Amino acid sequence: MTLPKGTMTGSLKVLAPLLIWMSIGWFSYPYLIKDIADAAGESMNIEEVRTFSLIMTGVCLSLGILFGIMGFRGKTVDENEFKRMTGELVICQHCHREAEKKPETIKCQHCDGYL
Amino acid sequence: MGNVKKLPVSYLAIAFGLGAVAGFIAIWGEMGMMLNNFGIIFLEPTAITVFSAVIVAPLVEELAKPLGIYMIQGDEEPDLSLQNWVVLGAMGGLGFAVLENILYASNVLSFGTDVALGLLLLRFLLPLHMIASAITGLGFGLWVKTRKGIYFVICIFIAMLIHGLFNFAAIFVG
């Protein structure tokens, strides 16, 4: 089943700020983790952590900006599109089971009787 | 926002609250799975940590966090927009994260309050649970809208994968 155009737009609007928030977290990660490790008396390879954090900051920030552009500038799907796609759920008068009624399929999917 | 309906505050509260409750369920679930696979620790000393963080935790937590949205749909079958389901998923993840972050911070209180607060801040700056649960919420919303469960399966798998990779990085990078 192909999803209607703009299905993901609304979701991207939610994910974009979360990814930008995450990129701030990754940026501050080496500084905060170093303080925590020092206070707890643990040793760590801070250079490796810093490199990884910078990569993750870039990935999250890029995705956040991309999702933001796609989410806030793209067309949002009309929710009625889904209703048109799936049809209406009705109880079949013949077999008394739940069946999907669409303009093009008016027969029950279970017993083939007319809905 | 077009056709986005206003989300009732009660739904947000249910998603958040049950997301936090899911934290306890996940801890029990993870313990159960760990006990079933206890033999793995004899293979490799670090295997238990990796297995727990990279396989067990994402599997159990991603299934448990959207507890609120399962219940909202089961009880009320509301006509929500896809974006609303994503927001509810993220709220479940936030509830879970709040509980988990407080638990982690309280575990390191013996090192000092500044360490605990630093860890709390660090964990709140990385909203992994919200992102993963938002993706699960998207899958759930698509399932409700299209009546095709495969969307939920795909989205929850992506959420588990992101969670697992994040934990893998946390173990091996620091």
Image: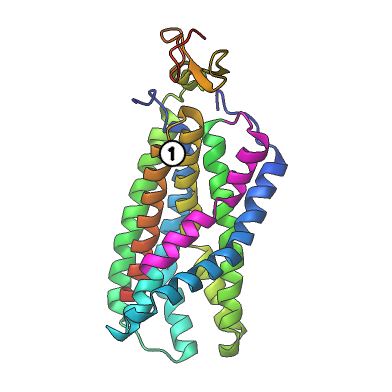
Mark 1, residue position: A12
Residue A56: percent from the left, percent from the top?
A: 33, 60
Q: Is residue B10 above or below residue B6?
A: below
Foreground of the two, A38 or A102: A102
- Name which residue type carries label 1: Leu
Whether residue A48 is visible to the viewer of this picture, yes or no, is yes
Residue extending furthest bottom? A41
Residue B58: percent from the left, percent from the top?
A: 42, 61
| Residue at image location 57% in from the left, 82% down from the top | B107
Q: Is residue A50 left or right of residue B139?
A: left
Foreground of the two, B28 or A92: A92
Q: Is residue B168 left or right of residue B110?
A: left
| Residue at image location 36% in from the left, 44% down from the top | B154
How is colour applied across the structure in the image? rainbow
Q: Is residue B115 above or below residue A62?
A: below
| Residue at image location 37% in from the left, 26% down from the top | A3
Asked if the stretch drawn in magenta spans residue B22, the answer is no
Query: Splitting the image into 4 quarters, where does residue B105 fall?
Result: bottom right
Q: Secondary structure at mark 1?
A: helix
Query: Splitting the image into 4 quarters, where does residue B48 fall?
Result: bottom left
Residue A78: percent from the left, percent from the top?
A: 49, 20
Query: Quadrant where the N terminus of chain B lies?
Result: top right
Task: Determine the main secondary structure of the stretch shown in magenta.
Answer: helix
Q: Which residues are magenta?
A: B54-80
| Residue at image location 50% in from the left, 69% down from the top | B122
Q: Is residue B109 above or below residue B67?
A: below
